[in-house]
Image (cartoon, helix red, strand yellow):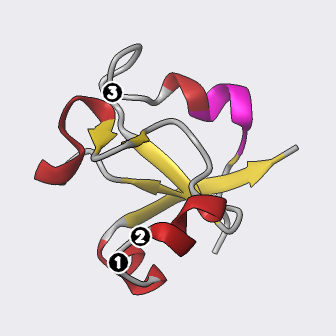
């Protein structure tokens, strides 16, 4: 899978407020969650879009399989 690379700064712009895109990252992959009703306005409970949510998943009431339903749009790079 040939995916574009995005920096944390580029990801941060896809927060549902600065741009219409609502993206989040998990384990180095960037997911488009724009179509999810749970991510409207770039927020899902206490989580904000445009960020790497890898460290926060341990506190979530679901597993990483939740990302299976979202399109991977890129890779998060340093």
Q: Earlier in the sequence, mark 1 or mark 3?
A: 3
Q: Position of residue 10 (x, y in %)?
A: 65, 28
- Residue appearing at x 68%, y 68% in the figure: 27
Q: Earlier in the sequence, mark 2 or mark 1?
A: 2
Mark carried by residue 9 = none
Can residue 8 be found in the magenta stretch?
yes
User: What is the crowding at mark 1: few (fewer than 14 residues within 10 Å), some, or many (at least 20)?
Assistant: few
In which quadrant of the rendered view does residue 20 lie? Answer: top left
Can residue 25 be found in the magenta stretch?
no
Q: Earlier in the sequence, mark 3 or mark 2?
A: 3
Secondary structure type for disc 1: helix
2 and 36: which is toward the camera: 36
Foreground disc of the pair 2, 1: 2
Q: Which residues are magenta?
A: 6-11
Q: Determine the CA span between mark 2 and mark 1.
A: 11 Å
Q: Position of residue 22 (x, y in %)?
A: 36, 38
Q: Is residue 41 left or right of residue 49?
A: left
Circle 2 sits on which residue?
A: 60
Circle 1 sits on which residue?
A: 66
Tag 3–tag 2 contact (CB < 8 Å) = no
């Amino acid at each position: 899978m040939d995916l574009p690379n995005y920096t944390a700064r580029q990801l941060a712009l896809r927060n549902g407020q600065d741009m219409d895109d609502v993206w989040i990252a998990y384990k180095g992959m960037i997911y488009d969650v724009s179509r999810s009703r749970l991510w409207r306005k770039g927020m899902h409970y206490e989580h904000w879009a445009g960020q790497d949510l890898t460290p926060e998943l341990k506190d979530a009431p679901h597993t990483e399989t939740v990302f299976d339903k979202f399109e991977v749009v890129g890779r998060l790079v340093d």
